[in-house]
Amino acid sequence: MVQQQLGFGLMTPQSQNRATDWLVDAGLRPTRQRVALAELLVGDGRHRHVTAESLFEAAKKNGDAVSLATVYNTLRAFCDAGVLQEITVDGSKSYFDTNTHDHPHFFWEDESRLSDAPSDQLVIQRLPEAPEGVEIASVDVVIRLRKK
């Protein structure tokens, strides 16, 4: 079973059903590998932030035979289907969030960890005007934290 310290819940028949429903509702075919990864992501009904590497390690510990390339491709398919949000930190490290609603994030630099920041404490009074011919599609807020 998956180690709890990785932040992934224990797998149960209910978690597998939740994962399968999540895929079907998104219009994705519930293949064995997709269900296994979806179960790690949403099986316990809680939101989480993962990297491809952390999900790959959790899948291995859970006994799921998936390659790192499959994990990357599956995460991309989940993002394309709108059930995951990708947050890029430093232009090189991507985190994937099961909460797809607009919300700010804390990036803990000392731990290379992403977490939700309280939305009710963030106030954006004004955005710059978009150049002519384009519109603002979204605004991503990542607040970087480090120990004093």
Image (cartoon, rainbow, N blue to C red):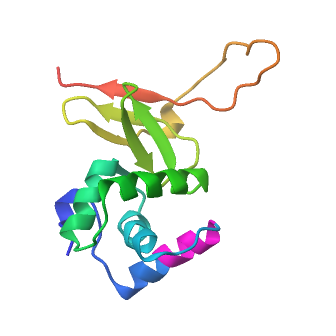
Q: Position of residue 148 (x, y in %)?
A: 17, 20
Q: Quadrant of residue 45?
A: bottom left
Q: Nearer the viewer, residue 11 or 66?
A: 66
Residue farthest to the bottom, as pictured:
13
Horizontal side of residue 34 vs 54, given as left or right: right
Q: Is residue 45 visible?
A: no
Which residues fall within the magenta stretch? 19-26
Report the residue at 73% width, 13% height from top.
129
Instruction: Answer above or below: position of 135 versus 111.
Output: above
**Residue 23 place in picture, x, y as percent:** 55, 70
User: Relative to residue 99, is residue 107 depicted above or below?
Assistant: above
Give the quarter of the figure containing the N terminus: bottom left
Dividing the picture into quarters, in which one does residue 67 lie?
bottom left
| The one of 115 and 33 positioned closer to us in this rendering | 33
The magenta stretch spans residue 35: no
**Residue 62 x %, y %:** 23, 72
